[in-house]
Image (cartoon, rainbow, N blue to C red):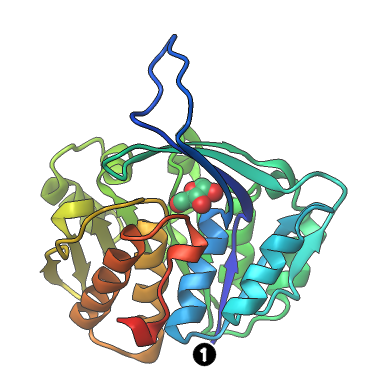
Amino acid sequence: MKLLNFGSLNIDLVYRMDHLVRPGETQAAQSFARFPGGKGLNQSVALARAGATVLHAGKVGPDGALLLDTLRDAGADVSPVAVGPEPSGHAVIQVERSGQNSIIIYPGANGCITRAEMDAALAKMDAGDWILLQNEINGIPAIMEKAKARGLKIAFNPAPMDQGVRAYPLELVDLFVVNETEAAALTGLTEEADALAAMERTYPNAIHVVTLGARGSLCSANGQRYTVEAKKVQAVDTTAAGDTYIGYFLALLMEGAPVDVCMETATRASAIAVSRMGAAPSIPLRSEL
Ligand code: RIB
C-alpha cells in the first residue's frame, strides 16, 4: 500500500525571539535560520522516516531545490511534484523561549496547482491507496473528489483552518487529524470531548484524531475511544510537532497497527521533534524512537 501526500512545500525563515512580537513592537531576533518546511513536506518526511511508501505531490518554483532534496533524502518519491515559474511558498516563523511559535505563510507555488497537475499526480495511485491532504494548497475539494472517484482513502488535516473548510466535501474523508483549535472551528464546540463527539456524529465512518499538544491526543475509531498522554520533554521548537504525529500515525495505520499503537508511536516521534529546532530537520528516524 502506498500514500500520496498532496501538500505544501515551504522555505521556513525561522527567527528565535525572546517573545512573540506584539502589535506595534519592534524586536531584534536572537538568531535566524532557513529550513525546509511546509505542513505537506513535513508530513511526507515523517511518513518516509517512519518507513511508509510515500509519493509527494505539490508545486515548487525555480528556487525549490532544497525542498525536493529534503524529500528525496528522506526517501519520498518526488516525481509528482510540479515545477512552475512562481516562487516556492515560504513561511516566516517566530519561535519564543518556551518553544511556542507563530507562523505567517505565503503560498507562492503552493497556490498555483492546475487541474492537469492534480490528474497527473492522482494517476500514479491505485484503489485502496491513501491520499493525505492539509489546507495549504489550492484545489482541495477537487482533489478530494477526484481521489475518491479513484477509490483512494482520504486523510485530511485541515490546517491552517479557514472559513472555506466547512464547505469542503468532508463526507469523503476517512481519517481526520485536527488540533483542539481546528476541532472547535469544525464543530463550534470548545470542549474537545464534545467536539470529538460531534465529529463522530457527523462523520460516523471516519477515524477521528484530536491532538492536544502537551496534553496528548484523543482518537475515536470503530466505535471506541482512545487517549494517550504526551511525553514530558524540554520544548525547544514546537514547529512540525503535529506534522510528525500525523506522518507517524498514518505510517503505522498503513502497516495495520492497532490505533493505540499508532497513537503511542506518533506521540513518541513528536516528542523528539519538539526537542529540536526546525520543521523537517527535527523529525526523527524510526530507529531513534
Ligand atoms: O506545521 C509547521 C509548518 O507550517 C511549517 O514548516 C511552515 O512552513 C507551515 O507550513
Vertical arrangement, residue 193 with respect to residue 225, above or below: above
Judged left or right of residue 38, residue 250 is left
Return the residue nearer the eye: 71 or 260: 71
Vertical arrangement, residue 218 with respect to residue 129, above or below: above
Residue 29 location (% of width, % of height) = 48, 31
| Whether residue 212 can be seen here | no
Judged left or right of residue 30, residue 7 is right
- Amino acid marked by disc 1: Met
Secondary structure beneath dot 1 equals loop
Residue 67 location (% of width, % of height) = 67, 62
Pick the quarter of the image with the C terminus. Answer: bottom left
Q: Find the residue positioned furthest to the right.
A: 85
Residue beneath the point at 71% across and 67% down: 68
Label 1 neighbourhood size at 10 Å, few (<14), some (14-19), many (20+)? few
Q: Identify the residue under disc 1.
A: 1
Residue 160 location (% of width, % of height) = 46, 43
Judged left or right of residue 63, residue 78 is left
Q: Quadrant of residue 71?
A: bottom right
Residue beneath the point at 43% across and 13% down: 25
